[in-house]
Amino acid sequence: MARKQDDTLLTEQELAAAFIDDDNDDLLPGFDDDNSRSNSTPTTRSDDNWEDEADDAMGQLAVDVFETENNLVIKARTAGVDRNDLDVSISDGILTISGTLSSGDEADVRQWHIQECYWGEFSRTLALPTAVNEEGVKAELKDGVLTITFEKIKQEKAKKIQVL
């Protein structure tokens, strides 16, 4: 389930708003401009090359980000990704996770009947919500979950300055 930062669930309208196509300003079928459900008939895309465009699009990795008393933790499901196909980097508080998910050898495939799984490159870049020690980081890939743990930097409380 998709949640807001305050841990409440997203409404149907909020979730649908996340999928508005900014390039064409096309809305998802069945939604009006105010993201409310409409009674209109879903429209189909007239572009015959939509499958080619989908193949060129890079997938986005879903992440969970949370804090403990001493750490900032990022978790991402990366089932099926080889650790050698993962690239994790940090620079100035910006974390980037990218990689490739390979379906294996498809040379013998003659015809697809259903293909719902995403195969190919994925990437996610996010600004870390708190100051961390970029040198003291651990990344572990276990059971298809990538866990990145940063040590938080203790922020000193504001110091009161006496005005003379």
Image (tube, rainbow, N blue to C red):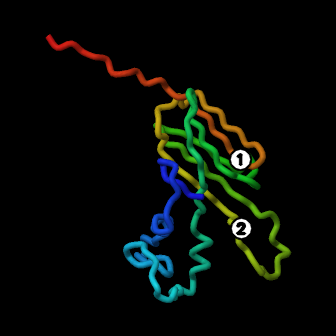
> In the image as oriented, which residue stretches furthest toward the top?
164
Q: Is residue 51 above or below residue 8?
A: below
| Residue 151 makes an appearance in the image | no
Structural distance between the alpha carbons of marks 2 and 1: 17 Å
- Left or right: 74 with respect to 36? right
Q: Residues within 10 Å of mark 1 (few under 14, many from 20)?
A: some
Q: Is residue 120 above or below residue 44?
A: above
> In the image as oriented, which residue stretches furthest toward the right?
108
Residue on which the image places disc 1: 145
Instruction: Name the residue located 62 percent from the left edge and 72 percent from the top edge.
Output: 55
> In the image as oriented, which residue stretches furthest toward the left?
164
Instruction: Name the residue located 67 percent from the left edge and 63 percent from the top edge.
Output: 120
Q: Residues within 10 Å of mark 2 (few under 14, many from 20)?
A: few
Residue on which the image places disc 2: 117
Residue 40 screen position, x and y as percent: 46, 87
| Residue 81 makes an appearance in the image | yes
Task: Please name the amino acid that badge 2 sits on.
Answer: Cys
Residue 121 screen position, x and y as percent: 64, 60
